[in-house]
Image (tube, rainbow, N blue to C red):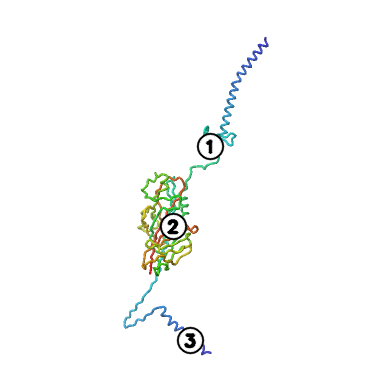
Amino acid sequence: MTTEKINERKGKKEDKKRKRKWPYILLLILLLLLLLLLLLRSCGNQHPCPNPPPSSSSPVSSAPSLDDTGSAEPGSSNTPSRQKILSRLQKQEVTVTDKVSAQASFSSGVKGSTGTWEVENPSSNTVIMQCEIVLNGETVAKSAPIYPGQHINGLTLSQPVSSGSYSVTAAIKYYNKTTKAYLGMADYKIHLSVS
Amino acid sequence: MKNRFKRVLAGIVTFAVLGVTAAVPAFAADKTDTGTGSVTGNVTINGSISPLTISVTHPINVAYAISPDAETFTAPDITVTNNTKVAVIATVESLKAASGGSLTFTDVDPSAKAWRSLNLADSKKYIALGIAAKGNSGWNSGYSTSTHWAVNDSPLQVGTLNPNISGALSLTADYGLAFDGAYTANHQLVFQFQLA
């Protein structure tokens, strides 16, 4: 009888002990779950990750995560200074020196006759020059190409011109020395004399 | 022997004298004026004058930059130097938008557009580019202070430059701000020079 009672008491005590343990076990499970969640979260922010987060295109995606590789420059972005822009633009500028005689003269106004007119392309220039004499909007004479360090003494009439004195335009066209591409032009008011 | 030598020497002297006498009229068309009392002699002086060489140093292309964020237009001064022995007149014959860049602008009057409100398409299409003489930069007094706008066809006589003097011109512009990339655009500037 006594042993039965003792056993009963023991059983009750063990039951009580088990009942006391349950909350602890539950708490432990909860803690473990929390830890697991935290681990999963931190996995999402770091690479390499055994289980990569779903891509942004996935409909069940969470908030986008930062790709924390590389580094940016400190401070605000700086636009180039006016001085820097100016010096860049000045480097693109092509400057020439022209030397043009103020008069072209022809002993005859017949087409094909040769006259005198001096034009020099100084060796300091970096462009090819070609000159034309324009009378009333029509080119009446055209020079050969004049390379830097070269000059012409005369040119040939490509159109007949009546004898007389004219105020004409000497148009100088400039071409790139390498590509032969047209760069620009300048005009000179000169005197044309045809005998 | 002595006589022979004398004869040769006399011959040389005779030839020399005759040569000089014959050569003199070839150098000067001498005229003998004769008369009694005071004699008037007319002498014609023939001058031969060569044409002057006009020499000017100038740029043949002009570059500019637009920074929409800063709302700035940057262009270096355009310097023209007169290397001629006398003064020359500089004229801006034309300033026109040209092809060759990634954009080809259409030149318009500065008052033609509400520039800061231009949309993307119009910002890439329109510009009002002008050129004017820079004060105190070498131009003789009486130089033009007005701006030549690219949209205008009439030339602008800028002013006169004395020998070995440089004058400067500056570019000015009105432009849109809506640019969706880096672009380049060209304008062609043509000067005309003549003796003053």
Element under disc 2: strand
The residue that mark 3 highlights is B11
Q: Are labels 3 and 1 on one chain? A: no
Q: Quadrant of residue B86?
A: bottom left
**CA separation, marks 3 and 1?**
118 Å
**CA separation, marks 3 and 2?**
71 Å
* Front in this rendered view, residue B95 or B45: B95
Q: Amino acid at mark 1?
A: Leu
- Residue A148: image x %, image y %? 48, 62
- Quadrant location, the N terminus of chain A: top right
Q: Amino acid at mark 3?
A: Gly
Q: Are labels 1 and 2 on one chain? A: yes
Element under disc 3: helix
The residue that mark 1 highlights is A66
| Crowd class of label 1 (few under 14; some 14 to 19; many from 20; radius 10 Å) | few
Lower position in the chain sequence, tag 1 or tag 2? 1
Q: Which mark is residue B156?
A: none
Instruction: Tell me if residue B21 comes above or below residue A20 in the rendering.
Output: below
The residue furthest top is A1
Q: Which mark is residue A184?
A: 2
- Residue A170: image x %, image y %? 40, 62
Residue shown at the point (60%, 20%) measured from the top left: A22
